Amino acid sequence: MECIVCDFREDLVGQPVKPHQYIKYAAKYIPDHLNYYYKNGKCLVKLAQILRGRKIDIVHSNNTVVSVGYDIAKRLNSKFVWHLRGFMNLDFGCMPLRGWHKYSKTLREADAVIGITKSVLEHYIPLESKNTYVISDAVRSKDDTCLVMPKKKYFLFVAGFLTEQKGCGFAIAAFARSGLALNGYKLIIIGEAHPKYMLRLNRFMIGAGISDAVEFLGRSDQVKEYMSRATAFMMCSDNEGLGRVSIEAMFYGCLVIGRNSGGTKDFISDGETGLLFSDMDGCIVAMQNATRNDHQDIIKRAQQFAQENFSFEVYGDKILDVYSKVLSRVLMNN
């Protein structure tokens, strides 16, 4: 396998907070536009030289903000597949550097558009548009599962970086209001946080009287062990594109309590493969439910669902099927 490294600029920039700020905002990012076209122009020239004489059938941009793949495909006379992976504006407060109009136009002209969930795909392009597919990410091998019973008395929250957008503060507030700390339950949190945000969380926990019941582990290589033994895993992000950690929890036999939004609602069915909530009160009810009832049936259904939809073995076949359809249209047109 050959790997070619080429510098490029992502089609991504922070979005203006208010509409009347757009002109000042646009002027501020003129240097970024120039850098985008300069870097990506150099990338196109370099790749054209390296790949001269080769037949490249498909260019696959495996990221929501890598629009340069479309230009590379045009230069190489190849088909273009764009893989959308998250809500750039809802989750990260960003927008395409080139603007939404050009971004949407590129999507419509792609030979195939893949969304990691139905919600992600429909956020950018109508599901009924031609050549659109929903293919969930591969998270684990179908055999990488475990089911540990009984569960220990703690809830688990995991994120690479702990932020309000990921719902860390929400999870702590829900745990505090649930009263479960009085019953011996804990909230274990895995991930890193900015010192200022950590200070804010600590102040809240002291005020709520739950400091001794919340444990921050930082980064950990024992996520599987913690998931397999937790009473439930909490996914509290407002606009999670997919939520790999939720799926990992499903593989590892952990009940998922997830927000009824974003990609989470596409694979967590309330009472079937997990417990869904829409607001703080709903989250508290779900947490209390998790401690009072036996959810082995839900856990086992969720684990089977994860094996059938998020395994490495299934994923590869689905991607190859999209490639096959894209290339078959070429043959039909010739």
Image (tube, grey):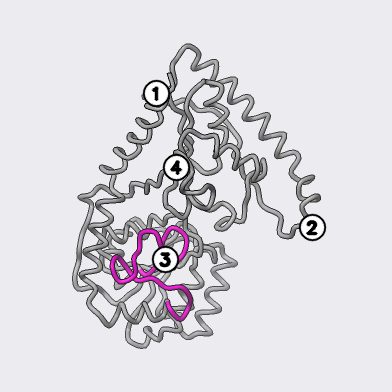
Q: Which mark is drawn over residue 332?
A: 1
Along the polypeptide, which appears first: circle 4 or circle 2? 2
Magenta-colored span: 257-282
Between the C-alphas of marks 1 and 2, the distance is: 49 Å
Q: Which mark is drawn over residue 207?
A: none
Residue type (three-letter) at the residue carrying disc 2: His
Between the C-alphas of marks 3 and 2, the distance is: 35 Å
Name the residue beneath numbered marker 2.
20
Residue 44 versus residue 133 in the image, above or below: above
Asked whether 128 or 230 is in front, the reply is: 128
Residue shown at 49%/17% (left/top)? 51
Name the residue beneath numbered marker 4.
132
Q: Residues within 10 Å of mark 3 (few under 14, many from 20)?
A: many
**Mark in front: 4 vs 2:** 4
Between the C-alphas of marks 4 and 3, the distance is: 27 Å
In the rendered image, residue 139, in percent from the top left (x then y), is placed at 33, 49
Along the polypeptide, which appears first: circle 1 or circle 3? 3
Asked whether 36 or 168 is in front, the reply is: 36
**Mark in front: 1 vs 2:** 1
